[in-house]
Amino acid sequence: MSGHGFHVHGPHDHELEHAQKGAHGDHEGNGMINQIAMFTAIIATIGAIFGYMGGATQANAGLYKNNAAIKKTEASNQWNYFQSKSTKQSLAEMSRDLSTKDEDRAKYQAKVDRYEKEKNEIKLGADKLEAEATEWDRKSDQQMHQHHRWAQSTTVLQVCIALAAIALLTKKRWLEYAMFVAGAAGLVVGVLAALHI
């Protein structure tokens, strides 16, 4: 180093100049970095929304399954009530058949008729409750299927974000393309979830 314009560079000076050119002069590298960063931010936001939707559908499936269990219990109670009326009806029929007096037979026949009518009403209520339980089960199954779609979509989008990080570190163009493909696949599965397919 002298004052006459002669300058000797150390080995690290060359690396610093190269790094500065790479950071500021390499527009293709900057474009790739900016593109991946923007894409990752968008995919992460969409993934968060899909993750929320997956959690919501899972919660709905649990609530619907609970409603189905409640309706099944109510139907079971109605069938037990039906059975008690059947037992009373059988006892009334036996008493009627064993009675020797016409007025006792008429009294027991009136009970038999009453129990038969009550049983029919109870049966209608129990059948309705069973149908409601079946419908809640069906809704729960639909929600679980949709939950699985949201979870699949979220998983693929997380893989996409991981590919983006690797593409940034390695600066491999093929990884960037793989990232775009994974992102598109995650979005397609998310659309299928939204459409209940």
Image (tube, rainbow, N blue to C red):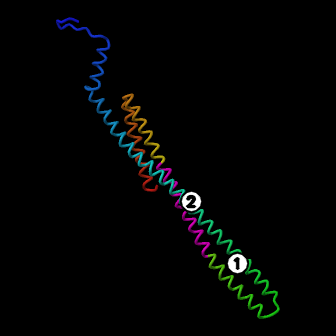
Q: Say which amino acid is labelled 2.
A: Lys
Q: Residue furthest left?
A: 4
**Percent position of residue 122, x then y:** 63, 76
The residue nearer to you, when weighing 103 against 47, is 103
Q: Which residue lies furthest to the bottom in this view?
A: 102
Please tell me which residue is depicted at 62% across the width and 68% down the height of the picture. 74
Q: Say which amino acid is labelled 1.
A: Lys
Q: Is residue 146 left or right of residue 91?
A: left
Please tell me which residue is depicted at 46% across the width and 49% down the height of the picture. 150
Q: Is residue 92 above or below residue 173?
A: below
**139 drawn magenta:** yes
The residue nearer to you, when weighing 100 against 148, is 100
Please tell me which residue is depicted at 39% across the width and 29% down the height of the picture. 169
**Percent position of residue 159, x then y:** 45, 39
**118 drawn magenta:** no
| Marking on residue 65 | 2
Element on which disc 1 rests: helix
Q: How many marks?
A: 2
Q: Quadrant of residue 21?
A: top left
> Mark 1 or mark 2, which has the lower sequence index?
2
Q: Is residue 39 above or below residue 145?
A: above
Q: Is residue 17 above or below residue 107?
A: above
Q: Residues within 10 Å of mark 2 (few under 14, many from 20)?
A: many
Q: Distance between the residues labelled 1 and 2?
A: 30 Å
- Please name the predominant secondary structure of the magenta segment in the image: helix
**Percent position of residue 124, x then y:** 60, 76
Check disc 1 and report the residue beneath it: 85
The segment highlighted magenta reads 124-150
